[in-house]
Amino acid sequence: MPSASSLNLYTTYRSRFPDPARCLLTTPDGIAYTYADAERESARIANALMALGLARGDRVSVQVDKSPQALWLFLGTIRAGLVFHPLNTAYTEKELRYFLQDAGSAVLVCDSRRADALSTLCAALGTSHVFTLDADGTGSLTERLAGVSATCVTAATAPEDTAALVYSSGTTGKPKGIMLSHDNLVANVTTLVDQWGFTGKDCLLHALPIFHVHGLFVAIGCVLMSGSAMRWLRGFAVDAVLAALPHSTVMMGVPTYYARLLGNPAFDKAVCDHMRLFISGSAPLLAETFVEFEQRTGHTILERYGMTETGMNTSNPLHGERRAGTVGSALPGVAVRICDGQDRPLPAGAVGELQVKGINVFTGYWKLPEKTAADFTEDGFFRTGDQASRDADGYVAIVGRSKDMVISGGLNVYPREVEQLIDALPGVRESAVIGLPDADFGEIVAAVVVPVVGQVVDGERIRLALRQQAAAFKVPKKVFIVDELPRNAMGKVQKQALRDAYRSA
Ligand code: MCA
């Protein structure tokens, strides 16, 4: 039996489930799944995983397309007391090798098209179990569930036990595993449901991928914790969103979604008639988008701010003024401060590093205690690396980043990782990767490349070579070939000079 100090994310979701016959999700093909389906199918997956003889805390790595079965897999992994390790479907085999090895995965679930190549990789890495799960819900995982009991006792996990391991790249170019505990995820989603007014009457339009914090723990979490329903789209497509909006009440998205909707004249007040809330995050929402959206639909987008390490930290209010260019104020239970270089809090209006503290903040980087220690202050605040200011009313505005990072369409890209790949290509002496403004993605990744003297390199070839090694969202959309990079007196590449030079290229 669970002890008094146990807390499992699934059990918490389950405690808020409505009548089991209520609809949980409707697929793009119009197939409806109920809360009873979620309970039954996740139990079968939990039982099948436990039957493998895995130990509590073992990592289940998952690189699959969005499907209801993928959601049952997430829930089943949590119920079994295992650690869910979601992977972007865009990752190449080279990237997967790193993730599986670093995570020490016990299980990999992947698409059947990649099964042969990844089974060989897993055999080499010691990942004992490989299953397939395709977008249509078929695969060896589903076959394995035949005859497996549809009831299970959810594992009693401690609040600080890791529920999910989510990787994010870093300034050194090596992705880091972010350990999110049951406690972190429960605390954050409980706050969000309350702050954003989710009830069983809501229907969330879900177009996000489910391998990131935004689409999984925030969007699906709010639905499960409020007993509401969702309409699923496989990905973001304007026509499909326009068709789903009249049947939905809430939408969550990255700014690119809202910019693309505004690009279609059919997106107007009438199509949003049934909606109560549009939420934006994962990247800065341009004030122009906020204003145009309001003029076109009568809705003000609610912008909030979070990170994989912390879940959501601040939010504009459900009731009250939503201010363009701000991410709102600290969520209940989250302490937010703006500090100088010595971790001293600054007064209202001053720009400094945004630091956060609360149960929402992750327990640490996987196998990187020194990196974890360096990213927290002595008094336990997490250094976000974002530069921000807070006004006298508590509204926070993110004004820049101290980390060298590009956010493209809501996905973080670390230049160092891309530079290392480019620099290893034949004929390349060195490179600098920067973010350039883009109307669709917010920012795009661009590379400025210096060839070895006497050699010729071609931008398109560089893109093609990178495409073999890295997910497409990391591949520079633009490549500029130059004779040398601008450097300061210390020899450091002046990225701001490059951004200024190529801004309008
Ligand atoms: C796809 N591509 C991209 C991106 N996505 N390039 C740059 N940035 C991107 N975000 C590439 C593709 O690989 C392809 O390249 C080309 O662009 C078009 O591919 P397609 O599949 O058509 O992509 P898309 O439909 O245009 O996708 C753009 C998107 C998608 C809809 C904005 O990236 C998306 O859904 N982003 C959401 C990401 C998200 O969930 N972030 C949350 C992280 P090629 O032509 O070369 O093949 S969680 C987080 O940030 C924190 C916690 C928070 O606060 O939420």
Image (tube, grey):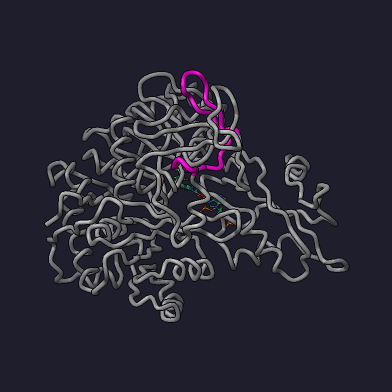
Percent position (x, y) of residue 263? 54, 35
Q: Is residue 238 visible?
A: no
Observer-nearest residue: 230 or 445? 445
Quadrant location of the C terminus? Answer: top right
Name the residue located 26 percent from the left edge and 71 percent from the top edge: 54
Q: Is residue 289 left or right of residue 223?
A: right
Name which quarter of the figure residue 275 lies in. top left
Observer-nearest residue: 450 or 134? 450
Name the residue located 56 percent from the left edge and 36 percent from the top edge: 353
On screen, residue 447 above or below 502: below
Q: Is residue 377 visible?
A: yes
Q: Is residue 164 left or right of residue 375?
A: left
Quadrant location of the N terminus? Answer: bottom left
Q: Which residues are magenta?
A: 377-399
Percent position (x, y) of residue 362? 40, 48
Percent position (x, y) of residue 273? 35, 26
Q: Assess whether residue 386 is covered by the magenta stretch.
A: yes
